[in-house]
Image (cartoon, rainbow, N blue to C red):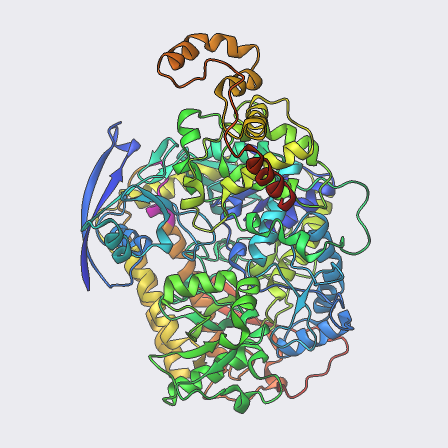
Amino acid sequence: MATTTFRVFRYQPDSGESETYHQDFHLDHDEGTTVLDALLRIQNEQDGTLTLRYSCRSAICGSCACKVNGKTVLACMTQVEDAKAESGAATLQVDPIGNFAPVKDLVVDLSPFWEKFKAIKPFLIPDGPAPDKERLVPKAAMEKVTKESACILCAACYSECNSLAADPEFVGPAAFAWGYRFAADERDAQRKSRAKLYSGEHGIWDCTRCMFCNERCPKGVDPRDAIEKLGAIAFQEKVTKDKGARHAKAFLISMRTGGKLNEQLIGGYTDPIGGAFNAPLALRMLQKGKLPVSPFTHKVENADQVKKLIKNVKETI
Amino acid sequence: MRTHDVVVVGAGLAGMRAAIAAHEAGVDVALVTKLHPVRSHSGAAQGGINAALGNETDDHPDNHTFDTVKGADYIGDQDAIEILCERAPREVYQLEHWGAVFSRQEDSGKIAQRPFGGAGFPRTCFAADLTGLVILHTLYTVCVKYNIPTYEEWFVTDLVTDDVGNAVGVVAYDMIHGTIETVGAKAVVMATGGAGRVYRPSTNAHASTGDAMSLALRKGVPLKDMEFMQFHPTTLAANGVLVTEGARGEGGYLLNKDGDRFMTKYAPNKLELASRDVVSRAEATEILEGRGADGCVFLDLRHLGRDRIMERLPQIRELAIAFAGTDPIDTPIPVRPGAHYHMGGVHVDHWGAAPHMPGLFAAGECACVSVHGANRLGGNSLLEAVVFGARTGEAAAAYAQEARTPNVPAHAAAETQARIEGLLVREKGPRQGEIRDELSTVMQEKVGVFRFDGQLREAKATVTELQERFQSVVVDDKGKTFNTDLIHTIETGYLLDLADCMVTGAIARQESRGAHSRTDFPERDDEQWMKHTLAYLDDGEVRLDYSPVTMTKYEPQVRSY
């Protein structure tokens, strides 16, 4: 047996109070108790108003994502004792997932999440009529999208997403993982139009690459990797007018020519017109020595080695 | 009030497949679900979906039909089973065309098929061990594509009938907005899934409370074959979480504490791949006779090797590590039989129509067509959900096209509202949690793998006593918004109804057939009992009646594996 204090986020809109607060509940429990089991026991034994979403309790329905001591997890898949050991705290603070408005206690308004999911055209759009039997898909080709197919839409990645925190319109990791799942499915005929749809403002290039979605995904979907693969698809399909795509391309050119980053070149290539408006920033960077004076900087010593590296990487993709 | 031609309650596999079929038939159809569609418990199905595609070896729907008839212990309706097995390939191809990511054969690119319990051929199509999730997602993406209106997180409290007793809609609690709403319709399709939460442990989700069955029962519609609850042979000891039959389909062994492959004794031909009732009884016998360890036997996958486990059974590994602290690559998993699938349900014909109530349809686990009889074969539940989901959607659409504008009683929502307010105002009494705990415990102990008259009658007495206590149940949460305390309380009322039907049917059926195994009546008795049980609710009392089983060409035989 163990005893744990659960410091639970509360928001009770029907009480007439708009305040949110944390409430402590003490619970004696078995060693193997999950956070979900503990919350349900609190609900049953101490306070029936405590509200959360949950269903399968086997890490597949995606209902019970929440933050435990600041880290987004599935409550059903997290053991209380493990969470305590990991954070080194005797108290577990349980909060709703981040980046969404609260509805009641741990329940948040997920409608923006579902709208974004729907916006990526999350359905197969094949060319031509279906055959009588199944479409033949080589095992290796099908396996290209199996990882992303395991996404349970729990929104843990949205909870942790820094791009979303900065831009609420950012489409987001799970939706893009699904986008990749269709774009890379050889039965789908919309590779190029999907690349266009997923680029542009709030699109794939707006990801800050903080990697939290990869780290916190409870199912190992690695949404950031999917976003990266969508970037590669955009290049393959020549959907490269996007500022983000140009930025990526500028990196490549800079590395290939000089073997190092050339900020002037990157700034100019990414956004030749808009870049001019960044002149004050450029000036400040110049003063601090963060920007080379001339765009034609010297090459690094082993620039041709870098070139070879790039070639190797290209061949393995 | 909102109205649609067809309203489908529940958005798992059966519900969404029905909605898609109705939409394609050209009617205005809407989904109502107490969860978001992708949260439905169909997504927890792991192992696969059966169809005689013949991709691995020659196979034919007739073989599938025979295996299913035998698996059902000869109480499934053979005409319905023929429909199930003949339409199976078409439905699997349809799912594939819609984008389902089925695992593929190495060279041909065809859908791979694995062996499963009670099947004569490798017939189970799969997507690793995430088959239910992949199909659930596939159907949801089609619903998104068709823009089918979906009332998400609307909990249905009542089935609405008109003055002549036809189904004309539902009343539901909109959880987010805190209002009670009526949805009128010419046809109502019930697809709310199983009632596994009558038991504890159970492989089922917290949401699997058999809502539709109780809603129909309370309106005079009989429930069929309620005494048949399937116990899955491999569930985790800690919390009853499912370990797919696919683990044995891929070659896993069952061992007792002495390391013996005990299935050689109970099913010398099919071994671990005998039907589920047979394997669960074998495990229960081993455990009862002292050859288990801590109430469990062991599922051994070590000889499959890391690569096979990672490719075909990744979720099983993840769940075993999370909930049993065991990595099956290195160590056998302790498992035991657990309540898993309910063969019984709303009495419907093979178009999903309820003969006792025009306008009412049901599909999936909450319905009883019946194709599973006394014991369902692994891989046939996803199949039933899509085949009969599609047929029921088609039938409901056809019915709606002929039906007049429904005459929905104007006071339906107000009556529900008053009933709920009456419940919320109560301050003193038991809470639903304690009633539910006692119910699921007594069902597990006394209406389990093995049953006999004395224990069944004790269980009936407990259910009756709990029903009385439930009359004064108290809801802690008095609020309007997302009141899960209220919902759980209403669900507990549903579970009590269904447990009563299960126990009453089990007491009456004095034979052993499929999942209903009576130690005091150990033989199957075709003369007396080759018939379906129909349970009605008359003034709060369960009354039983019986109906014949449809046979086509398969005479009952002795069932051995």
Asked if residue B381 lies in the magenta stretch, the reply is no
Residue at x 67% of width, y 61% of height: B349
Q: Nearer the viewer, residue B216 or A171?
A: A171
**Is residue B484 located in the magenta-colored stretch of the structure?**
yes
Residue B115, given in percent of the width and then of the height, sits at 64, 73
Left/right placement of residue B153 relative to residue B467 reads right
A124 versus B230 height, above or below: above
* A277 lies above or below B188: above
- Choose between A311 and A87: the one closer to the eye: A311
Residue B440: x and y, percent?
36, 66
Q: Which residues are magenta?
A: B480-487
In percent of width and height, residue B209 lies at 45, 57
Residue A268 visible from this viewpoint: yes
For residue B399, above or below residue B364: above
Can residue B472 be seen by looking at this rendering?
Answer: no
Task: Using residue A4 as the reference point, say whether residue B47 is left or right of it.
Answer: right
